[in-house]
Amino acid sequence: MTPTKIRALDAAIELVGTAGLRALTHARVDERAGLPKGSTSNYFRTRAALTTGVVEWMAQRELADMRPPEPPASAAGLVDLLSGMIEYATGPNRTLTAARITLFGEAGHDPAIRAAVAGGHALMKSWAVAVLTGLGAADPGAGATALMNCCEGFILHRIARGDTADPRPALEVVVRGALGRP
């Protein structure tokens, strides 16, 4: 990917994450990225193509940022890791996370965005299934779904409502349930 295209996509994420989906125009991306007029439209001819490109780039960036260390060796280690991921997503990575949440809503109306979102979700779920399998879960698929939904709920509430609740107590309950332990 060219440096100019990366600048455009990073600027687009910043616009969506700070000003919402209405702010995503080719001209505003060019302006935010400090690119000559028309640069973004050279890569993404339509707004739909730009939006899909943003979703795909976000998934690549998030996966690169969230490469977890060695899988946790215990339930407590998994709780620590997931708590850290929630903190990172809603702290240092807040703008990207806000953009992702905004585009999740759009995925309900746009099959191309839905497909891009589904790809990122599948990668994260496969990681969660592998971790739960390693920790001895009886049904790692269902456990991964529960863990991901819990984490996504915390992230959504922190971004949308400014909630500051500690995720650890809820994560401990969900991790125990996912592992089939009382």
Image (tube, grey):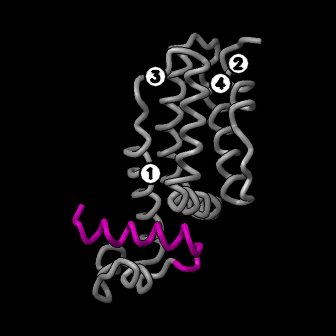
Q: Are marks 4 and 1 in contact (CB under 8 Å)?
A: no
Of residues 3 and 140, the one nearer the viewer is 3
Give the residue pinned by disc 2. 176
Residue designated by label 1: 59
CB of mark 4 within 8 Å of CB of mark 3?
no
User: Which quarter of the figure is the C terminus placed in?
Assistant: top right
Q: Position of residue 71 (x, y in %)?
A: 46, 22
Q: Residue sitting at 38 percent across and 50 percent down?
A: 60
Give the residue type that dot 4 points to.
Answer: Gly
- Identify the residue at the far bottom of this view: 37
Question: What element does badge 3 sit on?
Answer: loop
Q: Which residue is most to the left? A: 2
Secondary structure category for the residue under label 4: helix
Residues shaded magenta: 1-23
Q: Main secondary structure of the magenta part?
A: helix
* Residue 179 sits in quarter: top right
Q: Earlier in the sequence, mark 3 or mark 2?
A: 3
In this rendering, is residue 80 above or below 89? above
